[in-house]
Image (spheres, coloured by chain):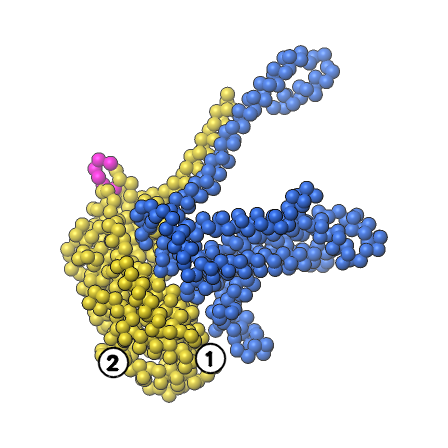
Chain colours: A blue, B yellow
Amino acid sequence: MTDQLDTPVGAAGTPAAPTAPARRRRRRETGHASALSAVPWLIVPLLLIAGVVVYPAIALVQASLSDYSITGLRKGSAGFDNYTSIFQHDDLWTVLANTAVWVVVVVALTILIGLALAQFMAKDFRGRTLMRWAIIIPWAASLVITSRLFTLILDYEHGILNRLLVNLHLLGEPIDFLGDDSWVMPSMIGVGVFVSLPFTAYVLLAGLNAIPGDIVEAARVDGASPWKIYRHITLPLLRPALLVASVLNLIYVFNSFPVIYTLNDRNPGFSHDTSITYSYKLAFKAAERSVGMSAAMGVVNVLLILVVVLIYLRIIRWREVTQA
Amino acid sequence: MNRRTQALTVGLTGLALTLAACGGGTGGGDAEGDSGKVDSIKLVAAEYSDETAGFWQSFAKTYEEKTGIKLEVQVVSWDDIDQQSSTMIQNGNPPDILNLNAYASYAQDDLLYSADDVLSDSVKSDLLPNFVTSGTYEGKLYGMPDLSSARALFYNKKLFEDAGIDAAPTTWDEFAADAKKIADLGDGTAGYAEPLGPEEAQAEFSIWMFNNGGNWKTDGRWTINSAENVETLSFLKKLADDGLTQNNPGKTNRTDGAFADFAAGKAGMVVGFSPLAATLDEAGKVDYGVAPMPTNNGDEPKSYGVTDYLMAFKKDGNADAIKAFYDLYYQPDQVNTFIENEGFLPVTTSGVEKFSSNEDLKVYLDTLTGVQLTPTDDPKWDTVKLAVQQEIGAAVGPDGDPKAVLDDLQEQAESGS
C-alpha cells in the first residue's frame, strides 16, 4: 500500500516517474483490487446484521402469525388471531397508558436532572473525580442487581427506606412502595431515573465540554447574566447532545425490562406493566401463556418505538439541529 | 492472491460464526445413524438449591461410567425454566429429560414417552401411589415424580407464649382467635403470614381449601367456585380485613415475603414445608413448632403436597438411554441423596422407609400417604394455575370479591376444555 501512495507524490516532478497512461492504468487496477478486497470485510458485518437484526425480526413476525401450544409447540398458522386477541385484551389500554407515563416521565426527569448533574460535574471543585466515579457506578452495575437491591430498600416490612422515614418520624406508618397501587409506578419511575442518569449526565457533560470557552467568556465580558448565558448560549449549543441523550433514552427506557419486572414481581395481573413486561408475561406468566400473542405484542412494540422516535424527531426538528 | 485468500478465510470464518450463533444449537441427543442409538443425552433440571448442580454432575459421572453414554446437564433457575424449556421446544430442540412441575401439556402435545416405554417395572412399583396418580395423563404415566413436599402449619412458640396460647389451633375458629391474640401483641406483628401473591398463590389457597372439604376438581369436574371454596376464600379475606395478617396479603409472595416475615419473628403462623424448617434451623433465630393444618369441618387435617416431575421427550434412539437414566435415578442411594440434599420428601416406598427414622420429617411423612395434590394430570391446570396466581390475590384486597374471582376462574377453567 505504501508504495502506491508514494507514487503520485514522487511523480510530482521527478524524471523517474512512470508515463501518464501507465500510471492511470495502474491506478485503475489498484482501485479495482482494493474494492474487491473490501468485499470479504463487508461480508462479515452484513452477515452479522442478517443474523442479529434481520433473522430475529423475521422470526418474530413469523411467530406472531403462528399458533403455539403452552409447551411451545407450533400448531400451525394463526393468521392475525394473535393480533386480534391482543387488541381485545382487557388490560392492553392500561398497559399502553402505563408505558406512556413511564417513558415520558422517566425521560423528562432524567434529562432535567442529568442537565443539572452535568453542569455540576463540569465545575472544577475538590472531589470532582470522586463524584464522577460515584455517578458512573450505578451504570456499571447490572440492572437486575440494582432493581433487586431496590426491592430490598423499598420493602414494606424490612426495607431501609421505611425504617429511616419512620425512625426519623417523617412517617407515622411505613409505606408499601411496591404493593400500594398509588405508589408502585412512582417507585418504579424513581428507580428508572436513577439507572438512566449516569449515561445521560455523561453525554450532556461531553456536550458541555465541547462548548468553546471563549464564546461564554465573550458573553460574560459583554455583561450577560449567568442565566442569560445559559439560555442563549449553553442550551442552544447543547442541543446535539440533548438530542442524542433524549433519543437514546426514549429507546432505552421504552425497552427497559428488568426494573419493571423485578420491582413489580409481587403484584398480580398487569396493572403496573408496560408493554415490554406485558409481552413477556403473555408468553410465560399470565394465564394466556401464548408465545404467539407475546410475539405479536413484540411486533407492536417495535412499531410503537419507531413511531415515538419519529414523532419526537419531528417535534424537535432534528434537521435544524443536525445542520446547525 | 495471498491477501485475497486471507480475506476470504476471514469472511468464511465470520459466516461460520454467524451461522453457529443463529443455530444456537444446545447440542446433545445426536442420533448416531444406523444403530439408532445415541451417544449422549441432555438433562434440563430445575434448580432447587445450591446443592442441585453438584448432585446432577456427580450423577452424570456415575451414569457415564455405567452406560458409556454422555449425560449433558443444564441446571436452570425456577424463574427461567418455563421460558427455556418452551424456547427449546419452539426451536425443535427439546432436552431428552426435563425436570419441571408440570407435564400434562407436554403429554397432550404427544411429546413424551410414557412409562410403558422407559420405566422398569421394579421402579414403577416402588413409586408412591398418589404420585403415580398425579403423574398419569389419560391412563398412562408420563410424569415421573422426582421429589415431593408436604405443607404443615408452622408457629412461633415465643409469640404463642407471649399471647397466652398453649397449643396449635385445630379449628378455623381457634386459628382466627389465636391470630388475633398475636396481632394484638402489636409492634407490627402479624397473626398469620398469608402469601396470596403471584408466586405460589395456588398452593396457599389449596391447603385451606382442602381443609374445608373443597377441591379444584371433583369427580372430573372443575369445582373452583363451589360453596366451600367461596367460604374458604372469604375466610382468608376476613383474616386480612381484620388486620390479622401482614400488610397486603394479596401481594405477598411466599419465599421473600411470608417466609421472611416468619423467619424475622414478625409472624405468629405460616404454612411451611421442610426446606423452611432447614432455613429456620440454620438461622437459629425463631423457636418454632410444626403442627397439622386446622380444619373447618371437623375432618382429619389434610396436607397439601407437591411433586415435581421428570419427563422424557421422544427422540430417535434415545429410549434405552432414558430407561438407564431412570433406573439409575430411582436407585435408593441416588434419589434419596437428592431428596436429602434438598430437604424434601421421598416419592418412593423405599424412601419413606429410609426417612421414617428422621424425627424432623415425621410430621410431614405422616401426612405424605394421604396428601392431596393439585390436578396436575389435567393439561388445563397448567393455564388455570397461572390464572389463579395472577387473580386470586385481588380477592383478599379491601375491595375484593371472593365469589366473583372464583366464578371467573371457574369460567376460565371450563372454557375450551
Residue at the right extreme of this rendering: A222
Q: CA distance from mark 1 to mark 2?
A: 31 Å
Name the chain under label 1: B
Q: Position of residue B407 (x, y in %)?
A: 32, 69
Rendered location of residue B339, percent (x, y): 28, 62
Which residue position holds label 1? B188
Nearer to me, B364 or B303: B303
In magenta, the rendered stretch is B33-38
Magenta-drawn stretch contains B246: no
| Residue under the point 35% across and 71% down | B404
Which residue type does callout 2 highlight? Asn
For the point 23% across and 66% down, the residue is B221
User: For the C terminus of chain B, which image quadrant?
Assistant: bottom left
Chain of the residue displaying label 2: B
Left or right, B381 with respect to B6, comes to: left
Location of residue A3 (image quadrant): top right
Query: Which residue bears the numbered disc 2?
Result: B297
Residue at 78% from the left image edge and 48% from the top image edge: A215
Count the marks. Answer: 2
* Residue visible at 59% across and 76% down in the picture: A170
What amino acid type is highlighted by mark number 1? Gly
Mark found first going from the N terminus, 1 or 2: 1
- The answer to whether one can see residue A64 in this image is yes
Residue B355 left/right relative to A136: left
Decide whether residue B37 is among the magenta residues. Answer: yes
